[in-house]
Image (cartoon, rainbow, N blue to C red):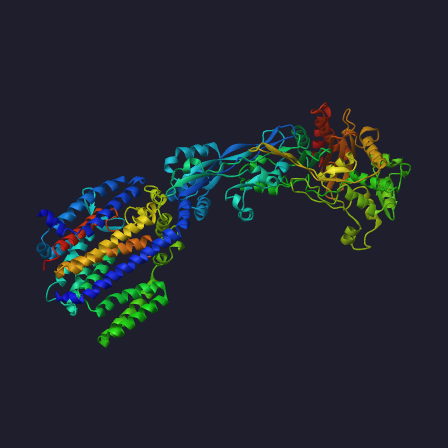
C-alpha cells in the first residue's frame, strides 16, 4: 500500500511519543519511590498511625504524717469528634449539655481547625443525669463521646486553698510558652503548689498508637501496643503541713480575715498555712463556671487573695524585737538601761501614746509588756540605719523564698527609701518613732513574720519556708528531699537571751500581753501586736515559737480588724501550738470562747 | 494444521502483557477491597476478567470483513444507547452514565469508544476520503464529537478527553496534514499552558508561530490558526478569572495539591504517598498501609495503580508501566504491518484509547496530570471498562491474525 509510505515516519513519531511518556513516567517513579521513598514512607506512617494521648493522673499530696490531703476523682468530659459529628444534631446536643448552641458550635469549629479527626472537649465535669442522657442517646449522636478525666478531691478537713492552689485549662498564650507537652484542653497548675510543682505533679502523657483508616476510624492497636508510650503518673508531694494543725487553724480563723502561718524552725517546713476568708477548691476542680469566677472576684472580702504571703501590713509591736536586737547587739543599751513610761512620749510638738503606764522599764520588760515609750526612745538612741540593718538580717524587705512562688517582699524603710518617698530632708525623726513600734511605712506579710519567729527560735539561723519536704517519683520509687536555702546571722548570746526572755515573759508572766497564748508545759515565747489600721479597726498580730529550748514550731497569726493582738491573735496561736506539740487539744474551753469572742467582735462592726 | 494456524496467527506479544496486567489487576483489586469490606468487587472483577478473556478470544476470530461492515451500524446503535442513557440512566457518583442490568451496571460510554474507533476507521479507509479536504475532516470530527457531546452531558469529562486523544491520533495516522495537526493541538496546548502561567503560554504561542512559518502553508490560514491559538489562551484566562472560587481552586489544586491537603488535593497527596512509600521493593502483598487503611476512596477504581506501587514498590510499578507500554508498542507495530488501512486505523485507534487512559491514569496517580476519573486499562475495577479493554485487545489480535488481508 503506497499510502503507507508516508505513514512510516508517523510511526516513529508515535513510537517516540509513547517512549517519551514511558521515560517521563519512569523518571517520576524513580523520583517518588527510589529517591524520596523514605520521605513518603514516613508520611505514610504518620498518616495511618494516630497517637491517642492518655492524660496522666496528677500526683497526690500528703501531709507530714502521711495523711492524704489532695486526691483525684474521676470526672466525665464530653468530647466531639468533628469528622463523625452530624451538624444537624448540634442543638439537640447543646440542650443535653445545657450550653448554648453558638458556644458549642464555636468549640467544635475550633477543633476542626486543629484536627477534624481528633476529639475536642466541649464540656467538662458533667453530672450524672447528663452522662446518662448521653448514654441513652449514643446511637443518635455519632461522634459524641465522653472521656474520663480526673479532678481534684480534698478528703480531709484541711482545705488550704491558697496553699494547694488549683488547676485550670491551659490558655492559648501558655500553650505557646510551654510548648509540646501540652495540648489544647489540658489542665495546668494555676496557683499555689499546683502551679509551683506543676512539672512534678503533672506526670507525662502516654500515647497509644492506633491504626486508622482515611476516615479516622480506629482499626486497632498498632503493633499490639508494643510501641505505645505508657503514661507516667505524676509525682506525689509530701508536705511539712500538719493536717490537724492546719484544720484547727482554719476552723479558728473561720469567719475572720487574716492568716496563720506556722513553720518548723528546724528545717523551714510550713506546718500550717491559712488565709481567710478562703474559697472552696472543689469549685475549681476541673472547670470554673463564669458566675463562680464573678462571685469570687466581686466578693468584697477577696477570698482569692492570699493574705498569708501577699499582704503588706504594718506588724505593730511584734516588730519590737528587731529594734531591741539592734540596740543590744550594738551595745547602745544594756539590761540596766531603763525608761520611765508615763503612758506617752512627747517628741517635738507631737505626743506619741502608749496603752498603759508602765513605769520604769528595761528591755525585757518592754518586750514583755509591749511598752511603746521605751521603744520610742530606744529608736532615737539606736538610729535608723542600725534598725534597718537588723531588720534585713531578720529577713524583712525581701522575699522569704516560700515554694508557692507568690509573696510580697514587703517594705523595710531605710534612709534611702525615705529619701525616695518623701525627698531628702523632708522627713523627720518623728517618722522613726512610728517605725519603732512597727507602724508607719513598714510592710510585712505573715509568712515573713513566721520566718522572723523561726529565726528568733533558732537564734539567727533560718531556712526559706517550704511547704513541700519530699517529692516521690512513683515510677522509680525514689524520693527527692527538698533542701531549703538557709540563712544565718550572729548575735551575741546575751542579746538572744534577753530578747527571748522578754518573749517568754510576754506569754508566761503576769503583765505579759501574750498570756492567752500560754500552753501547759510548752514554754511558749511570743510577742503580740496591735497594728493601727487607717481603714478600720486595728489588726491583731501574734508571733511566737515553742518550746523555748529546742523549738518545734514558730508561728504568726494575723487577724484583721480584730483589735488587740493579745486578745485575738495570741489565743489562736496558743491553740495551734498546743495542737501541734501534743497532737490534740488538751483544753477545750478557751477554744469555744476564742471563736465566739472574735465572732461577736465582728458583729460589733 | 490447527496447531500451525494457532502459532501463525496468535499474537503472544499482545496476549502475554494483557494476561499479566489482568492478574496484577485482580490482585490489586483484592488487596484494595479485602479490608475495606468490599470483597464483592473482587468477586465481580474475577467474573468480568473471565468473561472478558472469552470475549477477547471470540473477537479475535470474527471475520475481518464482517467487522468492517458492522462498523457503521454498531456506531449508530451505540449513539442511540448514549441518548437513552441520558434520558433514563441511573445516576452513579453524580453522573448519568449507567444502565442497571440486574445487579450489574453497564456504562455505554466505554463501549462507544470501540464503535467510534471502528466507525472512524471505516470512514477514513474509504478510497475517496482524503483529509486534505475540509469536508472529510469535518465528518471525521463529527464522528467523535457526537458521542463526546453526549458524554459531556452526563457529565464525564475524563472519558470525553480520551475521545479527543483518539481523534488526534487516528487523524494523524490517517494522513492529516501537519497544518491540520497544528490546528488541532496548538489551541488546546495554549489553553492548558495558560493555566500554568504567562511564560508557558508564550512558549506555546512562539512554538506555534515557528511551526506555521516552517510549514509555509496558505498565509491567511496560518494567520487564522495563530490567531485562534492566541484567542484560545486568552479566553481560557478570561474564563478562569470568571470562574467561581471553588472551581478555580479545583483547577489550581492540580498545580499544587499541597495547598488543600484535606480537600481537592487530598487524593493526589495520598496517592503520591502510597506510591512513594512503596520504595524499591514495596511493603509486600496486602501490607500496604495506605491501601489497607483505605486512604484513597474507592481506590480499586481510578487509583488502582497505587496498590501494586505501594505493595510491590518500584518493581511492581515499573512492571505495570512496562506491560502497558509493550501493548502500546505492539499496537503501533500491528498498525504498521497490516495490509488493510481499516485494520491499521483500528489498531492505532486502540493504541490511542489505551494510551490516553494510561497517560491520564498513571499521570494522575503520580501527581503529574490533573485528577480526572479515568480507569487504568486491564487493572481498574469495573465491568464495562474491563470488557471494553478486552474487546480492544481482541481487536488487536484480530487485526494481527488478518494482517495479510487487504
Q: Residue A50: horizontal and vertical position, in percent?
A: 43, 42
- Please say whether residue B85 is visible from this viewpoint: no
Does B404 sit left or right of B371 as displayed?
left
Residue at far bottom of view: B219
Image location (x, y in percent) of residue A365: 86, 34
In the rendered image, the vertical position of residue A558 relative to residue B111, given as above or below: above
Q: From the viewer's perspective, is residue B49 above or below residue B337?
A: above
The x, y position of residue A216, in whole percent, is: 39, 42
Instruction: Tell whether B200 sits left or right of A597.
Output: left
**Residue A477 coordinates in the image, percent (x, y):** 58, 31
- Give the number of callouts: 0
Q: Quadrant of the C terminus of chain B?
A: bottom left
Front-most of residues B1 and A537? B1
Q: Residue at x 72, y 28 (%)?
A: A575
- B384 shown above or below A354: below
Q: From this viewpoint, is residue A548 visible?
A: yes
Looking at the image, which is closer to me, B358 or A406? B358
Quarter assignment of residue B39: top left
Q: Nearer the viewer, residue A501 or B200?
A: B200
Amino acid at each position: 500500500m503506497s499510502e503507507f509510505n508516508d505513514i512510516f515516519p508517523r510511526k516513529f513519531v508515535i513510537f517516540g511519543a509513547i517512549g517519551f511518556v514511558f521515560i517521563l513516567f519512569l523518571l517520576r517513579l524513580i523520583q517518588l519511590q527510589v529517591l524520596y521513598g523514605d520521605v513518603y514512607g514516613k508520611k505514610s506512617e504518620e498518616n495511618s498511625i494516630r497517637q491517642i494521648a492518655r492524660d496522666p493522673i496528677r500526683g497526690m499530696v500528703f501531709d507530714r504524717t502521711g495523711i492524704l490531703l489532695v486526691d483525684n476523682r474521676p470526672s466525665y468530659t464530653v468530647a466531639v469528634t468533628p469528622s463523625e459529628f452530624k451538624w444537624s444534631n448540634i442543638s439537640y446536643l447543646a440542650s443535653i449539655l445545657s450550653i448554648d448552641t453558638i458556644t458549642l458550635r464555636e468549640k467544635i469549629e475550633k477543633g476542626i481547625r486543629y484536627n477534624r479527626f481528633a476529639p475536642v472537649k466541649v464540656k467538662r465535669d458533667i453530672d450524672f443525669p447528663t452522662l446518662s442522657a448521653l448514654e441513652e442517646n449514643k446511637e443518635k449522636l455519632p461522634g459524641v463521646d465522653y472521656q474520663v478525666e480526673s479532678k481534684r478531691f480534698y478528703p480531709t478537713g484541711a482545705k488550704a486553698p491558697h496553699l494547694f492552689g488549683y488547676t485550670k485549662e491551659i490558655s492559648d498564650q501558655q500553650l505557646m510558652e510551654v510548648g509540646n507537652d501540652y495540648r489544647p484542653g489540658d489542665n495546668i497548675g494555676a496557683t499555689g503548689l499546683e502551679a509551683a510543682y506543676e512539672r512534678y505533679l503533672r506526670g507525662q502523657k502516654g500515647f497509644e498508637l492506633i491504626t486508622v483508616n482515611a476516615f479516622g476510624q480506629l482499626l486497632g492497636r498498632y503493633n499490639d501496643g508494643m510501641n505505645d508510650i505508657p503514661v507516667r503518673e505524676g509525682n506525689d508531694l509530701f508536705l511539712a503541713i500538719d493536717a490537724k494543725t492546719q484544720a484547727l487553724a482554719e476552723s479558728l480563723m473561720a469567719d475572720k480575715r487574716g492568716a496563720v502561718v506556722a513553720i518548723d524552725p528546724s528545717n523551714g517546713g510550713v506546718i500550717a498555712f491559712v488565709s481567710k476568708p478562703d474559697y472552696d477548691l472543689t469549685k475549681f476542680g476541673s472547670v470554673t463556671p463564669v458566675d463562680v469566677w464573678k462571685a469570687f472576684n466581686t466578693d468584697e472580702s477577696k477570698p482569692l487573695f492570699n493574705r498569708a504571703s501577699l499582704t503588706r501590713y504594718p506588724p505593730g509591736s511584734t516588730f519590737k524585737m528587731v529594734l531591741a536586737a539592734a540596740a543590744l547587739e550594738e551595745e547602745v543599751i544594756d539590761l540596766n538601761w531603763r525608761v520611765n513610761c508615763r503612758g506617752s512620749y512627747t517628741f517635738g510638738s507631737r505626743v506619741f501614746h502608749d496603752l498603759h503606764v508602765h513605769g520604769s522599764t528595761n528591755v525585757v520588760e518592754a518586750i514583755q509588756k509591749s511598752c511603746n515609750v521605751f521603744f520610742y526612745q530606744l529608736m532615737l538612741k539606736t538610729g535608723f540605719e542600725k534598725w534597718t540593718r537588723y531588720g534585713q538580717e531578720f529577713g524583712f524587705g525581701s522575699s522569704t523564698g516560700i515554694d508557692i512562688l507568690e509573696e510580697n517582699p514587703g517594705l523595710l524603710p531605710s534612709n534611702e527609701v525615705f529619701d525616695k518617698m518623701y525627698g531628702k530632708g523632708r522627713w523627720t525623726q518623728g517618722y522613726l518613732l512610728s517605725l519603732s513600734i512597727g507602724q508607719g511605712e513598714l510592710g510585712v506579710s505573715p509568712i515573713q513574720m513566721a520566718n522572723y519567729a523561726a529565726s528568733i527560735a533558732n537564734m539567727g539561723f533560718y531556712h526559706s519556708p517550704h511547704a513541700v519536704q519530699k517529692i516521690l517519683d512513683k515510677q522509680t520509687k525514689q524520693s527527692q528531699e527538698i533542701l531549703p536555702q538557709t540563712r544565718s546571722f550572729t548575735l551575741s548570746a546575751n542579746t538572744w537571751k534577753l530578747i527571748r526572755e522578754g518573749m517568754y515573759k510576754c506569754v508566761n508572766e503576769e503583765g505579759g500581753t501574750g498570756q492567752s497564748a500560754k500552753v501547759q508545759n510548752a514554754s511558749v515565747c511570743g510577742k503580740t501586736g496591735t497594728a493601727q489600721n487607717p481603714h478600720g479597726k486595728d489588726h491583731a498580730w501574734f508571733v511566737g515559737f515553742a518550746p523555748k529550748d529546742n523549738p518545734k514550731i514558730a508561728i504568726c497569726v494575723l487577724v484583721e480588724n480584730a483589735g488587740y493582738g493579745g486578745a485575738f491573735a495570741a489565743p489562736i496561736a496558743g491553740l495551734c501550738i498546743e495542737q501541734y506539740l501534743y497532737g490534740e487539744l488538751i483544753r477545750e474551753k478557751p477554744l469555744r470562747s476564742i471563736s465566739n469572742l472574735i465572732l461577736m467582735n465582728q458583729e460589733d462592726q | 494444521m490447527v496447531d500451525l494456524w494457532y502459532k501463525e496467527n496468535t499474537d503472544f506479544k499482545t496476549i502475554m502483557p494483557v494476561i499479566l496486567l489482568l492478574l496484577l489487576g485482580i490482585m490489586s483489586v483484592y488487596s484494595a477491597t479485602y479490608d475495606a469490606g468490599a470483597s464483592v468487587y473482587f468477586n465481580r472483577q474475577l467474573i468480568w476478567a473471565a468473561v472478558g478473556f472469552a470475549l477477547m478470544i471470540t473477537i479475535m476470530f470474527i471475520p475481518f470483513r464482517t467487522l468492517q461492515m458492522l462498523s457503521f451500524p454498531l456506531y449508530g446503535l451505540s449513539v442511540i444507547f448514549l441518548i437513552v442513557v441520558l434520558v433514563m440512566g441511573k445516576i452513579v457518583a453524580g453522573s448519568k452514565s449507567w444502565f442497571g442490568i440486574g445487579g450489574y451496571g453497564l456504562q455505554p460510554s466505554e463501549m462507544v469508544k470501540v464503535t467510534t474507533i471502528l466507525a472512524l476507521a471505516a470512514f477514513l479507509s474509504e478510497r475517496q476520503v482524503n483529509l486534505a479536504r475540509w469536508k472529510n475532516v469535518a465528518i471525521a470530527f463529527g464522528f467523535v464529537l457526537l458521542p463526546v457531546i453526549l458524554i459531556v452531558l452526563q457529565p464525564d469529562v475524563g472519558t470525553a478527553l480520551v475521545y479527543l486523544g483518539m481523534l488526534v491520533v487516528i487523524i494523524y495516522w490517517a494522513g492529516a496534514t501537519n497544518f491540520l495537526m497544528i490546528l488541532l493541538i496548538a489551541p488546546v496546548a495554549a489553553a492548558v499552558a495558560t493555566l500554568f502561567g504567562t511564560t508557558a503560554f508564550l512558549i506555546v504561542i512562539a512554538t506555534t508561530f515557528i511551526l506555521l512559518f516552517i510549514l509555509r502553508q496558505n498565509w491567511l490560514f496560518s494567520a487564522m490558526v495563530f490567531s485562534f491559538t492566541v484567542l484560545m489562551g486568552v479566553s481560557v484566562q478570561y474564563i478562569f478569572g470568571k470562574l467561581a472560587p471553588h472551581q478555580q481552586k479545583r483547577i489550581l489544586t492540580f498545580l499544587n495539591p499541597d495547598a488543600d491537603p484535606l480537600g481537592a488535593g487530598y487524593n493526589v497527596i495520598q496517592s503520591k504517598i502510597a506510591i512513594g512509600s512503596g520504595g524499591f521493593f514495596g511493603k509486600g502483598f496486602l501490607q500496604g498501609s495506605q491501601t489497607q487503611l483505605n486512604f484513597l476512596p474507592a481506590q480499586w477504581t481510578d487509583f488502582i495503580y497505587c496498590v501494586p506501587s505501594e505493595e510491590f514498590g518500584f518493581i511492581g510499578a515499573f512492571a505495570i508501566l512496562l506491560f502497558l507500554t509493550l501493548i502500546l508498542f505492539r499496537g503501533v507495530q500491528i498498525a504498521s504491518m497490516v495490509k488493510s488501512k481499516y485494520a491499521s486505523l483500528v489498531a492505532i485507534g486502540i493504541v490511542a484509547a489505551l494510551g490516553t487512559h494510561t497517560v491520564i491514569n498513571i499521570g494522575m496517580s503520580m501527581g503529574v496530570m490533573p485528577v480526572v476519573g479515568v480507569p487504568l486499562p486491564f487493572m481498574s475495577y469495573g465491568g464495562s471498562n474491563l470488557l471494553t479493554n478486552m474487546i480492544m485487545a481482541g481487536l488487536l489480535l484480530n487485526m494481527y491474525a488478518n494482517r495479510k488481508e487487504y
